[in-house]
Amino acid sequence: MSRGEDADAWVAYSEEQSRGKSHEPARWVQRQIDETKGAVALRAPSLLMHAEAIRAGTERGVLPCYVGDAHPVLERLTTPIPELDATCWMVVHRDLRRAPCVRAAIDWVRQAFAEQRDVIAGEA
């Protein structure tokens, strides 16, 4: 997402994240930079920093659709990126999963994800 069509520099993640094994969005952006010999306008470790830098006009970057779509000054440059599709898991200790307060939290999260499925998937 970016503010303008002429954006060719990237807001990228830190070198450690971009070369590591656990942060696919960081690796994806780094592959784009490497393959196109693109410039890096800013390296930042957090999603919030990326969103604010892109919103401020620093150039282009990758944000979850539900983050970028919520900012009226940003525009999508592509459809959702299939390689960055992710599955969310909720992990609960088996001894606590039936506790009323934990069960309420689980049910709330499930309902929120179900109600916002299209927004989260970038289809809203």
Image (cartoon, rainbow, N blue to C red):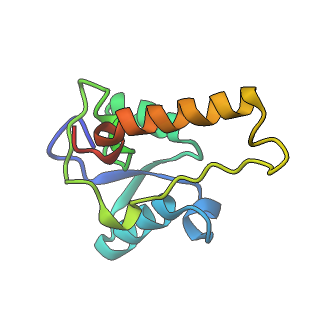
**Above or below for 94 versus 21:** above
Q: Nearer the viewer, residue 6 or 47?
A: 47
Residue 122 horizontal/vertical position (percent): 27, 44
Judge whether residue 106 can be spotted in this image: yes
**Above or below for 116 versus 7:** above
Position of residue 29 in the picture relative to residue 118 (left or right): right
The quarter in which the N terminus is drawn is: top left
Residue 48 horizontal/vertical position (percent): 51, 34
Position of residue 95 in the picture relative to residue 20 (left or right): right
What residue sits 28% from the left and 41% below the top?
Answer: 118
Q: Nearer the viewer, residue 107 or 11?
A: 107
Q: Nearer the viewer, residue 23 or 109?
A: 109
Residue 41 horizontal/vertical position (percent): 41, 48
Judge whether residue 67 can be spotted in this image: no
Seen as rendered, the residue at the extreme right is: 95
**Above or below for 107 versus 44:** above
Residue 72 horizontal/vertical position (percent): 24, 24
Seen as rendered, the residue at the extreme left is: 5
Seen as rendered, the residue at the extreme bottom is: 35
Q: How many marks?
A: 0
The quarter in which the C terminus is drawn is: top left
What residue sits 46% from the left and 33% below the top?
Answer: 111
* Quadrant in the picture for residue 114: top left
Position of residue 8 in the picture relative to residue 43 (left or right): left
Q: Nearer the viewer, residue 25 or 56?
A: 25
What residue sits 19% from the left and 49% below the top?
Answer: 77
What residue sits 39% from the left and 45% below the top?
Answer: 64
